[in-house]
Every structure is written in C-alpha cells, then in structure tokens.
Image (tube, rainbow, N blue to C red):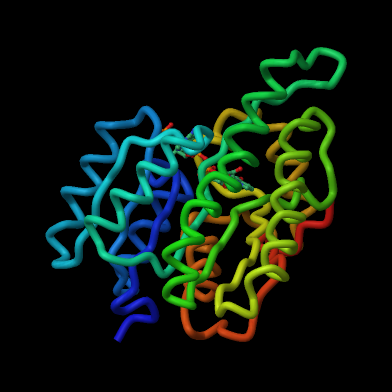
Amino acid sequence: MGLLENMVAIITGGSRGIGKAMVYAFVEAGAQVAFTYRSSAEEAIAIQDDLNTSGQMVKAYQSDASLYDDAGTFVKQVMEDFGKIDILVNNAGITKDTLLLRMNEDQWDQVINVNLKSVFNLSKHVMRPMLKARSGSIIHISSVVGVFGNAGQANYAASKAGVIGFSKSLAKEIGSRGIRSNVIAPGFIETDMTHVLDEATKETFLKGIPLNKLGSGQDVSDAAIYLGSDMSTYVTGQVLSVCGGLNM
Ligand code: NAP
C-alpha cells in the first residue's frame, strides 16, 4: 500500500519541473491529484491523460495561483470533483533574476505575487475544508535561497523567506486543529528554472554541494510524500532542506 493511499492532494504548478515530478510520484504513492498550471495547457492535459490510466483520479486545472479569486474557484471545484483535500503543495513559482540596481517594480511584484501571495491564496482557501475535517498537511516549496540569500535574487529570496515565516506562523495557528504546515527548501534541482543558468554558474553551485550532484524532482517529491503522509504526523513548523548539503 502506498504512503498516500486514499488521500486527495492539490499541487500548484504541476505542468513542469518539480511539480510535474510530484504529480507522478504522488499518484504512484496512491494519491488522487488535482494540479494547476498557468499557461502550459498542452503539457498539463498530456500528464492528466497519461495518469488517468492509473485508475486514480488526476485532473489538471488552469488557475493562476497569484490571483486570490482564481485560487478560490479552483479549491471550490476540487471539493466538488474530489470531495475532500488532505494535502496542499504550494509549488508554483517563478524567477525574475537581476541585481537590485537593475530590478524594476514589475520584476519585484511578479515574483512576490506568484511565489508568496499564492501561498496565502491557496492556504487561505483550503482552511475551511481542512478545519472541517480536522486534518490536513500543507507543504510549501521554498528554497535554500530563502534561508541564505543570493546575489541577483533579492525578489526571489524575499519571497521564499516570506514563505518560511508564513508556514511557521500557520503551524502555530492550526496545529491544535490537526493541520500541519511545513516547508521544503530545495537546493539546485534540474528543471526549466535552472536550465537557463550558464554552465559557469552551475559549476560554482556544484562545488558547494557535498553530495556532488544536482538534485532531481524525485528528490523533492520524496520529501513531500513524507510530509504529506502519516509518517510525519508529529512534524509541523519545520523547514526540510533537500539540497545535497549545499551551504551557500
Ligand atoms: P519550473 O520548471 O519553471 O515550473 C514552474 C511551474 O509553476 C510550472 O508548472 C508553471 O506552470 C507553474 N506556475 C508558474 N506560475 C504560476 C502561476 N501563477 N499559477 C500557477 N502555476 C504557475 O520551476 P521548478 O524548478 O519546477 O520550481 C518549482 C518550485 O520549486 C518553485 O516554487 C521554485 O521556486 C522552487 N524551487 C526550485 C528550485 C530549482 O532548482 N529548480 C530550487 C529551489 C526551489 P506553466 O507551465 O503553466 O507555466
């Protein structure tokens, strides 16, 4: 029996990268999955069609996580389609990297809205069904950059540090109601987000990773399955780094 058997999970940004790996891993672990995308409709539908042969319900929804009303409509639809929500993974995220001297207001606002406001939007909307069920696990995908900072990523690092503060506060608010809130802080994971980096930057990162390799979507998914499952029922308010030991 899989660790997520009979559970319903929401994963934001499931059309590519870590989110896509997580959709597959969660289904393999026995979960039914509702996942969102913003613009990659073709990829999302292909994942949905591929996984629906598994016998578990898997559904893709076009929903912009940075918009409060979109998040509300999406959660309502998931409740209608699946009947409950056991796990929320706040994964959707973007980068708009540049030094602060060159950063414009739009680059700041977009990153904060997609990476941080989305976490408020989705967490807020799943509160009602989770409080009613008196159980739930909320997992936020932050980044080691939110802990250590990184030149050229002031907007991204601020959004990811904000996610950690949000999660720790939420854990204190809702622990007594049986709901947990934890953060995964990935290091350098091979996805579209990191493919844009030049080889020299990747080499520099690699030198600082004791395990001497980049991470995969599966590495992050394994941590998310642990935090979503009953293996972690006494774990809340924590930040779990999945970074090969990277110390920036
Ligand atoms: P990715 O390959 O660029 O994929 C991003 C995903 O987020 C896509 O599915 C995308 O949907 C979705 N998305 C973006 N904006 C959205 C929005 N407004 N509403 C809904 N979905 C949205 O990125 P990734 O590398 O997998 O990153 C996933 C998460 O891990 C992010 O939060 C990122 O900050 C974090 N992270 C990544 C790394 C890394 O090394 N890759 C390290 C630390 C943390 P569309 O396909 O429709 O655009």
Against 8, is 23 above or below? above
Q: Which quadrant holds residue 72?
A: top left
Q: Which residue is located at x 30 percent, y 54 percent? A: 78
Give the x, y percent position of residue 25: 37, 64
Quadrant that contains the N terminus:
bottom left
Q: Is residue 128 above or below residue 145?
A: below
x%, y% of residue 101? 87, 15
Q: Residue at x 72, y 24 (%)?
A: 108
Q: Viewed as shown, does residue 52 lie left or right of 208? A: left
Choose between 233 and 40: the one closer to the eye.
Answer: 233
Which residue does the image show at 59% across and 47% down from the upper left?
A: 119
**x and y percentages locating residue 12 in the rendered image:** 44, 47
Q: Position of residue 18 (x, y in %)?
A: 48, 50
Q: Is residue 99 left or right of residue 187?
A: right
Residue 32, image quadrant = bottom left
Q: Which residue is located at x 72 percent, y 40 percent?
A: 159
**Occupied quadrant, residue 180:** bottom right
Q: Nearer the viewer, residue 138 or 96?
A: 138
